[in-house]
Image (tube, helix red, strand yellow):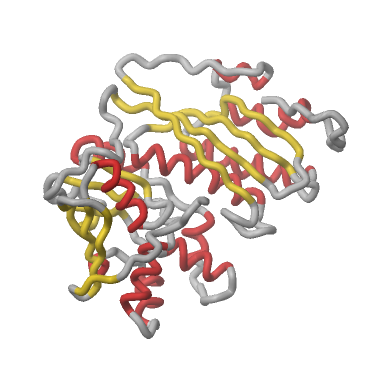
Amino acid sequence: MRSPKMPGAKPPATDEFSEIARLFRPLTGGAPGAFDLLDDAAIVPQRPGFDLVVTKDAMVEGVHFPVGERPGLIARKLLRVNLSDLAAKAAEPFGCFLAVAWPPGFGAAEREAFARGLGEDLTAFGVALLGGDTVSTPGPFTASLTALGWAPEGRMVRRAGARAGDVIAVSGTIGDGVLGLAAVNGEIADPSGWLTGRLRVPTPRLDLCEALREHAHAAADVSDGLIADAGHVAEASGCGVSLDLDEMPLSPAAAAWVDGQPNRAAALLRLATGGDDYEVVAAFPGSPPEGFTPIGEVVFGSGVEARVDGHPVNVAERGWRHL
């Protein structure tokens, strides 16, 4: 884990190597391949009978989280959204690599809070920090994490693999993420804190890995939006998807919000396209296993069609667009 600088760049207020040793070396958990973060590279040992599954997500201040968000929450979400990708692949996480670009507003206290939040969740999920990089930037704050997981050889669940006639099902509840953002922005009330909690500290569905390996033909995590991510499965599988938004599982907070909207179809569509739920949408050859709610089916053709009260709804934007 190192911190190269461009010629003429302003040096940091503290020595980066001592800070890495103080803040991030404890997060390796003593993993031998991390070499106490004293090298420019790490070694990931082989595990016979397993495939190494690798995923990467980045977060940018003002895009993926509000300006002024607490550093510890940023770190926790950064790890969790990556673990969500591994969960949808039915892979058990074990290690990660971190890259952080600190802007001027991130002083010693903010950097310590970031490392503390990351360390709490690394411990909670049994993941070791294996290496990475720290740099300075004029802004905004940017962080990227690469997560590593193991899946039994040939058993990773891909987006491709869904077949016409499969049941489309989703875990947990949908729409809390987009409503959580609305609450953070002051657009709606969130007296229980459920919605903002789901936005800021999502729970990767690692508890579903075995069920996905045993039963799913295909899967994706719901990060861009339920309709968008079901569409990713359909596109990769060379088929179409038909969704019944009336069957979409909602939390009590989201259901109450829908009941208060003048246009129910538009409200359900907003929840189905908002993203940031970090649940798993999957295709199953029959009834889905426990933890999943059936919401549609895989069909011949292409694209995604959605219905409310039996009537088709226009899906102009399927979800979050990165570009």
Where residue 3 appears, as percent x and y from the top left, is 74, 28
Quadrant position of the N terminus in the picture? top right
Where residue 294 appears, as percent x and y from the top left, is 20, 57
Where residue 13 appears, as percent x and y from the top left, is 86, 37
Quadrant of residue 2 within the rendered picture: top right
Q: Is residue 215 above or below residue 196?
A: above
Q: Is residue 106 left or right of residue 176?
A: right
Residue at (35%, 69%) from the top-left corner?
Answer: 269
Q: Is residue 316 above or below residue 44?
A: below
Residue at (23%, 61%) from the top-left corner?
Answer: 243
Residue at (75%, 27%) from the top-left corner?
Answer: 4
Q: Is residue 92 left or right of residue 157?
A: right
Q: Nearer the viewer, residue 231 or 98?
A: 231
Q: Nearer the viewer, residue 68 or 267?
A: 267
Q: Is residue 150 above or below residue 176?
A: above
Where residue 40 appears, as percent x and y from the top left, is 65, 18
Numbered circles on residues, count: 0
Q: Is residue 251 left or right of residue 246?
A: right
Q: Residue furthest bottom?
A: 262
Q: Is residue 298 left or right of residue 186?
A: left
Residue at (30%, 40%) from the top-left corner?
Answer: 159
Quadrant of residue 216 within the rendered picture: top left
